[in-house]
Image: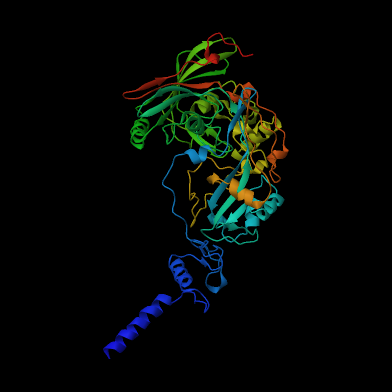
Amino acid sequence: MRCLRLRLSALRLWGGAMSGKRKADPGERPEAAAAAAAAAAAGGDWDLETGTDSGPPAKRSRQRKGGGGQRFVPPPGRKSPGVSFGLRHFTETQYYFEHGLRKVFPYYFDFQTYCKGRWVGKTLREVFSSEFRVEPIEYYIQAAKAGRIRLNEEPADLNTVLKNNDFMRNTVHRHEPPVTAQPIEILTQNQEVVVVDKPASIPVHPCGRFRHNTVIFILGKEHQLTELHTIHRLDRLTSGVLMFAKTLEVSKKMDQQVRERQVQKEYVCRVQGEFPDGEITCEEPIRVVSYKVGVCRVDPTGKPCRTMFQKLGYNGRTSVVRCFPYTGRTHQIRVHLQYLGHPIVNDPVYNTEAWGPQRGRGGKLDKSDEELLEALVDSHRSKESLDLLDLPEGDHRCAVEESSTDNTGSSTEPLDGPTEACANARTTDENSEAAEERVEKAGDGCALAVTEVTASGHMEKPAAVKDSLCGECKLVRKDPSAKDLVMYLHALRYKGLDWEYCSKLPRWAAADWQED
């Protein structure tokens, strides 16, 4: 009996080991069977013809069916805790310089997002038709056929009805507007902070159509300064003192000083007309009209704010003014100067006829918010200067209509990589890594240009490389002029409890300066 029990136990153990495993072929060699069993235990497959282990099996299709024939949607992935950019981001493309401008080679790039609440129950075709109108639906049809639109990491069918937690990825051929070729001067660098003198026209961080042509990327690519924490921001067309913390602890410390208003900020600007003498204080509340277009206005329902102004000089047409913002509202200095009737001379938003005959003086505006936004966009479209509003050039409705905030039951955070501060209306509103490999697999034969370096070491403009689906590749855009790349507003000085950083006065702030 004891021997019988031992034999039964051995048979049960053998049967458990073989349960679910591939049955051995009668003519199979013993060593091959053993290798196959080992490969199966490791989650791989053994090739009997070549005698090699193919490794772990490919991931199962995420489009597999669930119970009742329903399409399976995988649970949301874990969000990356990282917030900084590194080498894998900086190597997506390269710069070249031409006509005093810093330019970026077009590159392939992924935008990714989880399904938004308002998209649930709609097909991908309906979502692209209604919310991403910069490109015609024919583009998205061709992009889906080429494998550039993916749903849960599988090639997407535009007729698929979206469900909660669906994960979408859109590969695009990305073009960035040029910025000034003026180098970024490092004012101070130590173990705690990096302080630079930001040139006008360069955004602080990736936003809208800008990614590599930003201060964060230029510092990383050309000065090997990575993992920087933004302490404060400057508008793209504003120049001057810009501070970054090197550690999270320093960032929190300085951010606390900013929140508790222990940081003194001084700006200088050139405004229209003769500014009044003495100290002029404006305390009008400011409301954001559109985050997407980047427009604010004085409004009783807005947030309280306070700015003090002091005239430094007058050249007969325009005045140089010192500005001391005691609060930090979006476009605070620009909006308060507009309200006072002395807008910044070349402000592309707050010194235009879109605001009416008085250009917003005294807060007078005979238009609704929607009418104002449409007038601003139409004005810049007619001048081919939509980039001054940081907008993609396309259907103006994409710029005027604000996105719904209905995200019930969905996540819009990316699985990997930092979130850009602004949405890009060409695709979805979140970012991921470069996607050259996926595009190459789509078989369109496109590739990035290779930089040519002359004997002098300067990069030459590359030969035109076209993407068959890219609408931007079919356009010929004129370069912006020097006047388009600067606004006469400069961050002159930032002072905290135990630190102070200053920059030089810009040329246009000289008392006797006259505009060409």
> Residue 248: in sight, yes or no?
yes
Q: Residue at x 37, y 21 (%)?
A: 500
Colour scheme of the picture = rainbow
| Residue 131: x %, y % from top left | 62, 49
Which residue is at the front of the view, 493 or 431?
Answer: 431
Placement of 57 over or under 99, stated as above or below: below
| Residue 120: x %, y % from top left | 56, 59
Residue at the outermost left position: 2
> Residue 131: in sight, yes or no?
no
Residue at the outermost top position: 512
Q: Quadrant of the N terminus?
A: bottom left
Q: Residue at x 48, y 70 (%)?
A: 32
Placement of 494 over or under 136, stated as above or below: above
Q: Quadrant of the C terminus?
A: top right
Which residue is at the front of the view, 113 or 342?
Answer: 113
Placement of 319 over or under 104, stated as above or below: above
Placement of 471 over or under 43, stated as above or below: above
Which residue is at the front of the view, 198 or 5?
Answer: 5
- Picture quadrant where residue 476 is located: top right
| Residue 60: x %, y % from top left | 53, 64
| Residue 7: x %, y % from top left | 33, 85
Q: Is residue 416 left or right of residue 181?
A: left
- Picture quadrant where residue 252 is located: top left
Instruction: Report how many numbered discs are placed on residues in the image.
Output: 0
Q: Residue at x 45, y 14 (%)?
A: 278
